[in-house]
Image (cartoon, rainbow, N blue to C red):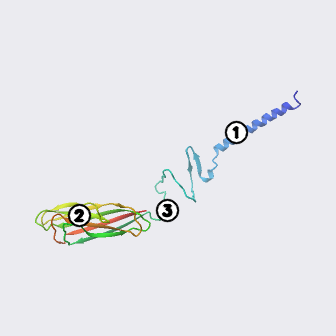
């Protein structure tokens, strides 16, 4: 037989549990709607997160995926370490005899800055000459970088007539160290006989090096 007050106590207990469950459900809903990282600028979303506002990273950071930077997001001050440097030089020769052996007639030297290991060398060799022979001839010209010939180009010159030609060469050099030198030159030759020295016989080289780290 039920004791006096037992039914009332059970009603109060059930009502108490219902209120507890309602409070718990409301708390869960509030937590789900809230952004616990709101003040830090961190906003979670499906498959990732969005970081808003200024952030400071005091340790190392690793990105295993792509990093997209909108134009202008990296300031000039942040690039003050000069990740790229350039150097240019030019030289020439005139009034020389053009023999039949490909020979470097003029050259320039570019020095690798400290901290750089690669260089894109943009060179252009030009040549002019007067065929002093009695038959048609050819004038050959090429650019050289570190004594490597970039390939000869040639043009024809009738007897007693001048000719001109230019030859580009743009190699990429690797394994460099600060203080190394890069020599860039212009090589010329005639086809079958030497052309006598003449003020019109000219050879020139212009070179630009883009140094990369």
User: Where is mark 1, residue-wise?
Assistant: 25
- Residue found 73% across the figure and 37% down from its top: 21
On screen, residue 27 versus residue 183, left or right, reads right
Closer to the chain start, of discs 2 and 1, is 1
Residue 7 lies left or right of residue 28; in this view the side is right
Q: What element carries label 2?
A: strand
Marks 2 and 1: which is nearer the front? 2
Tally of numbered discs:
3
Judging depth in this view, the residue of 105 and 158 nearest the camera is: 105
Provide the residue designation for mark 2.
141
Pick the residue in front: 152 or 72: 152
Residue at mark 3 = 78
Return the x and y of residue 72 as percentages of the image width and height. Answer: 47, 57
Q: Quadrant of residue 175?
A: bottom left
Assess disc 2: are there few (<14), some (14-19) or many (≥20) residues with their C-alpha within 10 Å of its C-alpha.
Answer: many
- Evaluate if marks 3 and 2 touch, with contact meaning CB atoms under 8 Å apart: no
In the rendered view, tell whether residue 53 sits above or below residue 209: above
Q: In this view, does 13 lie to the left or right of 95?
A: right
Which quadrant of the view contains residue 151?
Answer: bottom left
């Amino acid at each position: 037989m039920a004791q006096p007050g037992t039914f009332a106590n059970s009603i109060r207990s059930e009502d108490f549990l219902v209120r507890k469950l309602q409070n718990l459900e409301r708390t869960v809903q509030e937590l789900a709607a809230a952004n616990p990282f709101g003040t830090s600028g961190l906003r979670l979303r499906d498959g990732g997160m969005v970081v808003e506002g200024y952030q400071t990273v005091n340790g190392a950071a690793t990105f295993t995926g792509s990093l997209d930077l909108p134009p202008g997001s990296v300031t000039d001050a942040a690039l003050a370490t000069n990740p790229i440097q350039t150097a240019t030089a030019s030289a020439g020769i005139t009034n020389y005899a053009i023999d039949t052996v490909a020979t470097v007639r003029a050259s320039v030297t570019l020095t690798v800055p400290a901290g750089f290991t690669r260089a894109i060398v943009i060179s252009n060799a030009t040549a002019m000459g007067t065929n002093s022979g009695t038959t048609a001839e050819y004038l050959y010209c090429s650019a050289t970088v570190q004594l490597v010939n970039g390939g000869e180009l040639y043009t024809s010159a009738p007897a007693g007539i001048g000719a001109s030609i230019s030859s580009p060469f743009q190699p990429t050099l690797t394994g460099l160290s600060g203080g190394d030198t890069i020599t860039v030159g212009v090589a010329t030759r005639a086809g079958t006989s030497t052309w006598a020295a003449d003020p019109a016989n000219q050879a020139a080289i212009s070179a630009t090096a883009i140094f990369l780290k």
